[in-house]
Structure formats: structure tokens, C-alpha cells
Image: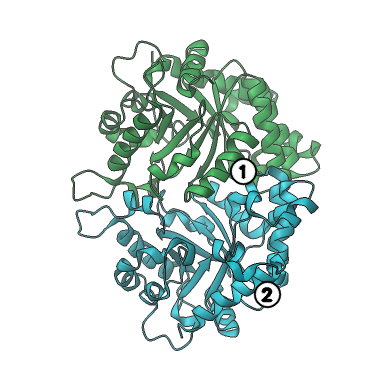
Chain colours: A cyan, B green
Amino acid sequence: MPEHFADRLASRINDIGAPACVGLDPVLEQLPAEVRSACADPASACRRFCTGVLDAIAGTVPAVKPQAACFERYGPAGVDALHAVCARARQLGFVVVLDAKRGDIGISNRHYAASAFDGLDADALTVSPYLGVTGLSEFRREGRGLFVLVRTSNAEGDELQSLPLASGKTVSEHVAHLVSAWGRQHSGVGSAGLSDVGAVVGATKAAEGQRLRTAMPDQVFLIPGYGAQGGTLDDVRQLLRPGAQTLGAQGVLVNAGRSVLYPAGPESVGLPWAQRIADAAKRFARELSTLR
Amino acid sequence: MPEHFADRLASRINDIGAPACVGLDPVLEQLPAEVRSACADPASACRRFCTGVLDAIAGTVPAVKPQAACFERYGPAGVDALHAVCARARQLGFVVVLDAKRGDIGISNRHYAASAFDGLDADALTVSPYLGVTGLSEFRREGRGLFVLVRTSNAEGDELQSLPLASGKTVSEHVAHLVSAWGRQHSGVGSAGLSDVGAVVGATKAAEGQRLRTAMPDQVFLIPGYGAQGGTLDDVRQLLRPGAQTLGAQGVLVNAGRSVLYPAGPESVGLPWAQRIADAAKRFARELSTLR
């Protein structure tokens, strides 16, 4: 039987000492000039950049989150690059969270799961609950994780997620309860007390953090919105599982994308791009290591 | 300036005489034995089957809806097959609705739009509103359409979409109002009175049809769930725009997948598979032609 996803993640977090995830969102115009000039096409440039990033941050953060859209836009060559990036990430020991936000009716979900887990061999996948939470069952695989969108970091998310229901809950709180119940029903929790069904909860929505944590005691929160989008360490503290004994059992995985991939500031000048990224990842991991 | 998407669709519907769309959901195990045995790999089989279907139904229905998941599961080769299928569909004059149910924060939506509209040259794309409706703006392209998931045909959709809000509306009714307002704000309506921002509304949810139609007077409803999933012609009637002068202006595009792709019954025995599919598409289009 494959190791429980949440256990594997918690153990990697404890090994590394920081619940940190680096988002791999390669955007051609922002890639280092030397990467762009060395590559014949955009997909190759994304591949070269991301594998360079992986080599630079290996051992510094436990997880990476490739953004499917950035690769998909370049068609078959882009998907091929995504395969290569996921393979390299697995090889280097990263937990790979494919950020694809898929969600459809059952049989289509089965196809998307095949793409993420058989094809790309991702450890986990982000999925959308609009077509229902129990309908996500076709995504479930032993040893693999899911992160259901519950409360996203973007401002427009409020249009749907903040709506007050007749029950007194908001839509996202209701989804949180569904996710928690569904996670328990299917696979219970691993030895760290965590479900392999996690939730996406933005760092920018920490004001709702306590209610969401109460509703989802077993969930790992994949937390976007840290850094460039305004989320802080104090925001993340609102989302921790109370009473957890280890960093990995605290149930958070904080993502930073732009602030690591495209570090700015005078101190970077003159350093090779991979070194600047390695330094930015170390700063990010150091910040998060204080959560323990 | 490119032609308004909803005008192009309405005009094709009027030319053909039926608001019919055939879903291209190739599932390896269900493909005709002769297609499978003639192809070296699953992606080639999906491509060969779908191009055969397109040739068989050209001139019978105005639109097709390729399901991205069915192709994506085969990696780069699958995406390559999807490109070929979309290209052939455009060549044969079909309106191509890519069913991918994408939805993310703004910049990722821009990448997905590039994939659908630049890469695959689809006429329209299905998108999910969980991260907000106005956040879907990055998907907008002049001359291209969107279909926002509002009320899906699957039973599990109720878990989120049927929730009663404090306002008295359900979640899907609220999304319907957002979609309508957002559609008007961005591009108004074409000469048929229809927005290029449409909505997915399942035939199996026709009981709510009148409220959804009132909330979304300008939207083309992309209607799954007809036939195999239980939706009937009477269900579709509940979703028509009242007072429309032409079939195309009635604001519906009804999808059938399995019932056309994998027709069953004794009458099919002995006929070549493409002929059976052509016959099933003709029956489907004939049924829908009576909506006028």
C-alpha cells in the first residue's frame, strides 16, 4: 500500500524544517534573458527555467506547485515540458502539487486524474468544488492527495465564496464542512492526523481562518497569497492546527511564487539568476521555519 | 472586427435548423473495435474516431464540444490529437466549444485562454465561477464565447449549486445574475440579442429553468444532460428565450454525447460505425428541430 499522501508531506516538511512550497509559474516575458536566448521556443524556455529552479531550491523547500496553465498554453510541447518538470521534481525529492483546478462530472474527473497521477505522476492535484464535493471521488487515488478550492486568495473569489447562506454559514464555510466530512468518509487520516483531502485557503483570507480551521480540523491547507499577494506570517499562524506536535502536523503548506521565481531588489544585481532564486527560497523557508 | 460569437452560433443554428451540439468524449474502451485495432496508441485512436465522427455529422449539427479531459489524459500526444480534432472541426464549419471547465486567478486564466483560443482555435470555452465571475475577464476575447458553469446536470452539483442563500436565491441563481450582469457590462449583445457570455444549464435541472432564464435573458444556455442523462425535449422547452423569432435566437445549444457517439439498439447491427453515428446525429437533430 502506498504511503498516505499527508504523511509523506508532513514527513518532508519535518525533514526540511519549513512548510514551504514554491509555485512554478513560468511566464515567458519574466524569464531570465539568458534562458530565453538559449531556447528555441517558449516551452523549452519554461522547461529550462523550471528545472534550473528545481536544482536551485532542492533541499530548501519540501514541495513545488507547477501551474498547469503556464505549460498548457504552449500546446503539446508545453505539456511535454510539464512532464519533464514534474519528473525532475520527483527525482529531486519534492512533493509535487499540480495546480490545475480541475473539476467536472465523474467520468471526466477520472480522465483528469489519469492525466495528473498516471501521466504526470503528481503527488497531489488542486480541484474545484463547483460541481459538488462528493463528485470529486473519481479523483481519489491511494497515496495521492487532493486540495479542494475552499477560500481562494484573489479578491474576486468573494463574489461566490463569501455569500451568506440561509444557514448562517458562508458558501466557503459550507464547502469546508463538505470537504472535511468527505475526507473522513473516504480515507480517514494518516499517522500525522491529517487527511489526504486538503483545502486551498488563501493567506489573504486569514480573518476567516479560525472558522475554516474549526470546520476542517484534519485538512492540510495549501496556502497561496503569501508574500507578493500580501499574506503574512501572522496570517498563516491563524490557519495552523492547534496543538500539533510537529511542523508537519500543523497542517499548512504555504506557497510563494513570484517572490521566489522573480526576486527583485538591489541586492540581487550581479548574481546569476539561479543563485538569486536559491537565496529567495532560503529566505522564504527561513521565515516559515519560525512557525514551529 | 471578428463576428460576435453568439451571432455566429445563432446563424449556424439557423442554417442547419437545429440547436444541436455533439459532445466529443472519446473513451478508449468504447471506441469501435476497428478503430482501436487500426491505431498504435490511444491518442491516435481518439483522433481517428473523432475525425471520423466529424466527417459523419458535418452538415447535421452546427456545433461540437470536445471534452478536454478525454485527450489530456494521454499527455502531449493527446493534446496533439485534440489540436487535430479542433482543426478538422473548424475546417468542416462546426462551431467548436472546448469543454475544459477552466477557472483560476486572472493571470492563469490568461494562459488558459491562450491555450483554448490561440492554441486550439476554439470558438468558445466552458469556465468555472468558483473563483469569481468578474475574475473570468482574462478569458474574454473578441469574437470568442464563454459558457460559465451555472447549473450542471450531475446530481452532486446540488451540494453547492442548490444551497439557499440568505437573500432567498440559490447559489446557482446568484451566479446566474452575476453572469448576466457581467456579460452585459463587457460586450453587450449581438444582433440576435445574445451575449457572447453564455451559461451551462443542465437539461436535468429544467424545474429551475424559468428562474434561470429570467435571470439570464441574454445568455445562450449550453445544455448537457439531454438523452442518456435523462433530459427531454420538454425540459429544453423550459429553457428557451421567450418571444425569439428564430431557432438561433432562442438561446439554447443542446449537447448529446454518448447517445450519438455510442448508439445502441438492434437497428444498428451490421452498419458501419460512422453510419450508425451519422444516423444517431440525424435523429438527435431532427428532435431538436421541432423546438422552433
A206 vs B36, left or right, is left
**Mark 1 = which residue?**
B70
- Residue type, label 1: Cys
Find numbered disc 2 in the image and state the secondary structure of the residue it sits on: loop
- Residue B109: where, in percent of width, then height? 51, 45
Is residue A231 something one can see in this rendering?
yes
A244 vs A190, left or right, is left
Q: Residue furthest bottom?
A: A245
Q: Residue at x 43, y 16 (%)?
A: B248
User: Is residue B36 shown above or below A211?
Assistant: above
**Mark 2 = which residue?**
A58
Along the viewing direction, whichever of A253 and B220 lies nearer the viewer:
A253
- Residue type, label 2: Ala
Q: Residue at x 40, y 52 (%)?
A: A132
Q: State which quadrant residue B31 falls in.
A: top right
Q: Residue at x 72, y 65 (%)?
A: A52
A42 vs B278, left or right, is right
- Residue A185: where, in percent of width, then height? 41, 68
Q: Which chain carries label 2?
A: A
**Callout 1 crowding tier (Cα within 10 Å): few <14, some 14–19, many ≥20:** many
Q: How far apart are marks 2 and 1 (CA)?
A: 34 Å
User: Is residue B85 shown above or below A135?
Assistant: above
Mark carried by residue A201: none
Is residue B269 something one can see in this rendering?
no
Q: Which residue is drawn at 46% across and 31% down?
A: B227
* Quarter of the rendering occupied by the N terminus of chain A: bottom right
